[in-house]
Amino acid sequence: MTTTGGPRFHGPIHGSQIAIGNHDVSQLQYVTADGGLGDRLTTAVNSVLDALENLRLGAEEEAAVRQDAEAALEEATEPEPDVGRLRRLLGRIQGVLAPIAAGAVTGAADGTAELAHTVIADLQQALP
């Protein structure tokens, strides 16, 4: 098998600027102050809220996750969100969901573990 010497990308490339085969390159990139933080977090946290009834949490755990998720949504919409607070809130949500997501690794039969795993992955990608 013959391979060309071209570039290979293994994974997503977001916000990158790549110039290949050029000698003189001038590039400009405009980035918003939060890099889309509010939109990413809003999407990820809304997926947590949408998944709550299917995650089979106890009443206290569900209430805690809902409270932290709503506080994270409120913080994410601030003009200058407190990233430390967002990380703490989302970390607590992940802490509640992690034992459920562990079922995805151990082969739990129902889709609850996979759902928790997906929600956690979305939250981690949304964090700054």
Image: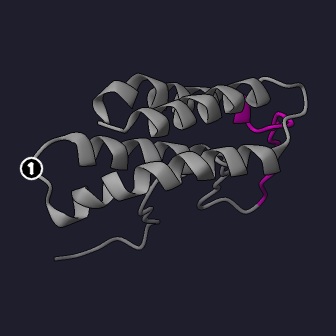
Which residue is at 81% across, 37% downward? Answer: 34
Q: Position of residue 35 (x, y in %)?
A: 75, 38
In the image, is 99 to the left or to the right of 64?
left
Q: Quadrant of the N terminus?
A: bottom left
| Farthest-out residue, left | 109
Residue receiving disc 1: 109
Residue 6 visible in the shown view: yes
Above or below 4: residue 107: above
Res. 74 image quadrant = top right
* Closer-to-camera residue (94/11): 94
Res. 116 image quadrant = top left
Residue 128 visible in the shown view: no
In the image, is 72 to the left or to the right of 28?
left
**Dominant SS in magenta:** loop
> The magenta stretch spans which residues?
24-38
| Farthest-out residue, right | 80
Above or below 23: residue 26: above
Crowdedness near tag 1: few (<14), some (14–19) or many (≥20) residues, C-alpha within 10 Å: few
* Closer-to-camera residue (54/1): 54
Q: Amino acid at mark 1?
A: Ala
Res. 9 image quadrant = bottom left
Whether 30 is among the magenta residues is yes
Whether 79 is among the magenta residues is no
Which residue is at 82% across, 42% downward? Answer: 28
Above or below 103: residue 115: above
